[in-house]
Image: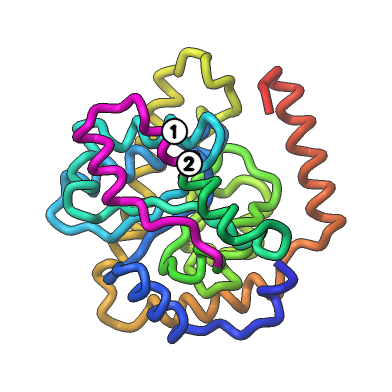
Amino acid sequence: VNDLLYRPSDTYGKQNMKLAYGISGLIVGTTIGFKRVKGDLILRGILSYYAQSKKSPTFLLPVLPEYSGKVMLEEIVKPDIMPLLSAGKLRLYFDASQWNSIIDTNELNQKYKDIFYSHIANMDVGDQSRLRSAWIGVLHSPVQRMMDLYLRPSISEAFGRGAVEAGLSGSVLLVSDRGHMKTYSMAKNVISLGKGLTIIHKTDTLSTEFLQDSERASQLFIRRINTYMEDKDGNLAKDSAQSVALCRKNCPTLEEMLNNWKILIEEMNDKNASC
């Protein structure tokens, strides 16, 4: 975060990074895993909508090493999301930039390539092929630098480090109203989540209210994405600049981050939920 805080936003660099990975048009991405607490059903609703739509941005999703990474891959090959993969509108990556100065680059590339292949090893051959085609590899620059819009639909959040990094990289933030994120995001792009969206364990049965509020939140995020897809007045560039300014002004201090973590952990313990 400190590294990004004092570096000017580089729109030219964003376009170059897109071109380097063969991606064009509006890019919507995230760095969060496919977890209940991170709004997995909301994200799924967004992907499913655009898979059935005539027009879609390109989505960038992380392949994480743990359980959530495997679950995400299993979800995106399901029939209602598969069209995004087939159309080349869903791309997969692992962001290794934070490890560059610690671990050898070749070792990082091999490690996370192996994790990706282990995740898909038991899948249908056709699904494996589609996922391999979507894989753009291990990135050694922060992935947020090529995202036009950054999604973080978390049900619970402390401060959202990935969102801060995205905002400082010039991505327009589309976030939930949970935790510290609303303080450094544009008010029009902060989505208010329903009261039914509370922390629950991944194995708990989902209530009707939880499902309905997830669907409602998906639709609200979709409206904001569509606004930028239809942008004819240069609002994306203006909002990108404002996003950088807001994050620089309101980036949480270390003390605020620690306090928010403490509150979040206490909240999870109160709900008897697993971290």
Viewport quadrant of the N terminus: bottom right
Which of the two residues, 121 or 56, is positioned nearer the viewer here? 121
Residue under the point 60% across and 72% down? 168
Mark 2 falls on what kind of element? helix
Please state the extent of the stretch shown in magenta in the rendering.
114-140
User: In the rendering, at what x and y percent does residue 101 appear?
Assistant: 71, 65
Judged left or right of residue 85, residue 148 is right
Judged left or right of residue 38, residue 79 is left
User: In the rendering, at what x and y percent does residue 129 appear?
Assistant: 24, 41
118 w.r.t. 90: above or below: above
User: In the rendering, at what x and y percent does residue 253 appear?
Assistant: 81, 62
Q: Residues within 10 Å of mark 2 (few under 14, many from 20)?
A: few
Q: Compute the Cα span from label 2 to label 1.
A: 6 Å
Identity, as a three-letter code, of the amino acid under mark 2: Asp
Tell me if residue 192 can be seen. Answer: no
Circle on res. 202: none
Is disc 2 in contact with disc 1, using a CB cutoff of under 8 Å?
yes
Check disc 2 and report the residue beneath it. 114
Check disc 1 and report the residue beneath it. 118
Identity, as a three-letter code, of the amino acid under mark 1: Ser
- Asked which quadrant contains residue 216, the reply is top left
Residue under the point 57% across and 68% down? 167
Which of the two residues, 63 or 208, is positioned nearer the viewer here? 63
253 w.r.t. 5: above or below: above
Q: Main secondary structure of the magenta part?
A: helix
**Was residue 31 drawn as part of the magenta stretch in this picture?**
no
Mark 1 falls on what kind of element? helix
Q: Which residue is farthest left?
A: 54
Judged left or right of residue 67, residue 99 is right
Viewport quadrant of the C terminus: top right
Q: Residues within 10 Å of mark 1 (few under 14, many from 20)?
A: few
User: In the rendering, at what x and y percent does residue 14 appear?
Assistant: 44, 77
